[in-house]
Image: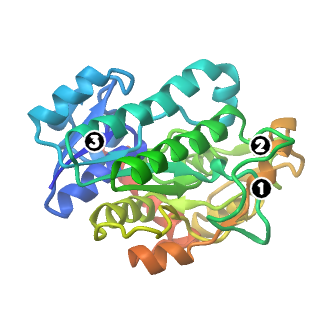
Amino acid sequence: MHVLVTGGAGFLGGYVMAALARQGHQAFAYDIVPPNAEMLAVSPDIASRLRRGQIGDIARLFDVCRSEKIEAIIHTAGIVGLETSLREPIATYQTNVMGQVNVCEVARQLQMRRVVFVSSNAAYHKGSGGSLVETDPAFSIRDGNPAGHYGTSKMAAEAVGLAYASFQDLDFLSVRVTAIYGFGMSSPMYIKPMVENAVLGKPTRFATGGRMKRDYTHVLDCSDGLIAALQAPRWTAGEQRVINVASGSARTAAEVATTVRNTIPEADIEIGDALTPLEEQNVKMRASLDIAAAKRLLNWSPKWPLEAGIAEYAEAFRRYTSLS
C-alpha cells in the first residue's frame, strides 16, 4: 500500500515510516522540515521519501497524494503540548483542527482506503474510574480541557474525522496515544534527560515533578499500534472509531527515576515531589489508558513494559552516541 505519513520526519512519524517499510508498504513522509540525525538513524529512507509541505496547504497535499498514488494516510502532524498551545492558541487550532479537515477532505476526494489519526489522551476531559476508557467524557459544560488548547484541538479533530466517517463514508480511525518515549524523542517528559544523562555519565536534577504521572508508552509499541490500525479490515458501521494505544500502566516521574537507576547503575537522579501549577492542572487527566479495545479490535498489545523500554532506549542512545 502507498501510505503518506504526515509529520513523517518527526519522532513518532519516523518510527512509523520504519515500521511501514518493514511491512513492505511504500511510505512517504509529508513534513515541513527534514529529518534530524537521530531520525535518520531510525529510518534512513526518510530523506529520499520526504515530500515537503505544510499540513495547512491543501493544494500541496493534493499534489503529493496524487503524484505518489497515496491510498491511505497516517496523520501524525500537529502542534503538541499544553504549554505550547497556551502560547500559540491560533496556530494550535489552525494546525491541529484545520490540518485534520485538509487530510480528511483529500482522503475523501481521492477515495482513499483509510485515515488513521494520531490523537492523544489529552482529548479526555477526565476519567470516570481508575483508567481512561474511550467512552469517558471528552467535554465539560463547566470547565476547559485540562490540557488547554492542545487537548481541545485533539478533541475537535476527532469530531471532524468522525463526521467524515458518518456522513461521507471515510474509513477513519482515531488512535489515542500518550507519553511516547524512546530514542529520538524531543519532549523531555522527565524520562529523556534521566536516560540520556545516565548514559552520558551526567547528573539529573529536578526541583519538582516527582508526583507527575503518565502512561509512558514506548515508541515501538505506538508505531506498531498505528500499523495495526492501518491494516485492520474495513470498519463496520456502529463500531467505535476511537481506540487507546498505550502501555496501560501509569507511572510517576519518581517511579521512572527508580527504574532508570535500576537499569543504568551509574544513573544519578534527584527529583522533588512537588508539581508546578501547570502540572497540577495537567495531572487531572493523567491516568492509565484502558487498552481492551485495542486488543479486541486491532489484535494489538504492548510489548515493551517500562523496564524493557528504558533499557532499549538507553542501548539505542548509547549506540548512536558511540557513532556520532
- Rendering coords of residue 58 (x, y %): 31, 24
Would you say 295 lies left or right of 27 here? right
Q: Which residue is tagged 3?
A: 107
User: What kind of residue is marked 2?
Assistant: Pro
Q: CA distance from mark 3 to mark 2?
A: 31 Å
Of the two numbered discs 1 and 3 on the same chain, state the one appearing first in sequence: 3
- Rendering coords of residue 200 (x, y %): 53, 46
Looking at the image, which is closer to me, 169 or 39?
169
Of the two numbered discs 1 and 2 on the same chain, state the one appearing first in sequence: 1
Which residue does the image show at 52% across and 49% down from the upper left?
Answer: 119
Q: CA distance from mark 1 to mark 2?
A: 8 Å
Looking at the image, which is closer to me, 219 or 138?
138
- Rendering coords of residue 129 (x, y %): 79, 71
Which residue does the image show at 58% across and 40% down from the upper left?
Answer: 156
Q: Which residue is tagged 2?
A: 146
Q: Which residue is tagged 1?
A: 126
Of the two numbered discs 3 and 2 on the same chain, state the one appearing first in sequence: 3
User: What kind of residue is marked 3?
Assistant: Ala
Looking at the image, which is closer to me, 141 or 122?
141
Would you say 174 lies left or right of 92 here? left
Would you say the residues marked 1 and 2 are in contact, meaning their CB atoms lie under 8 Å apart?
Answer: yes
Under circle 2, the secondary element is loop
Can residue 302 be seen from the camera position used here? Answer: no
Which residue does the image show at 71% across and 41% down from the upper left?
Answer: 147
Quarter of the image where the N terminus is located: bottom left
Above or below, 104 against 74 in this view is above
Query: Dot 1: few (<14), some (14–19), or many (≥20) neighbours within 10 Å?
Result: many
User: What kind of residue is marked 1?
Assistant: Lys
Query: Dot 3: few (<14), some (14–19), or many (≥20) neighbours within 10 Å?
Result: many
Residue 14 location, quadrant: top left
Q: CA distance from mark 1 to mark 3?
A: 32 Å
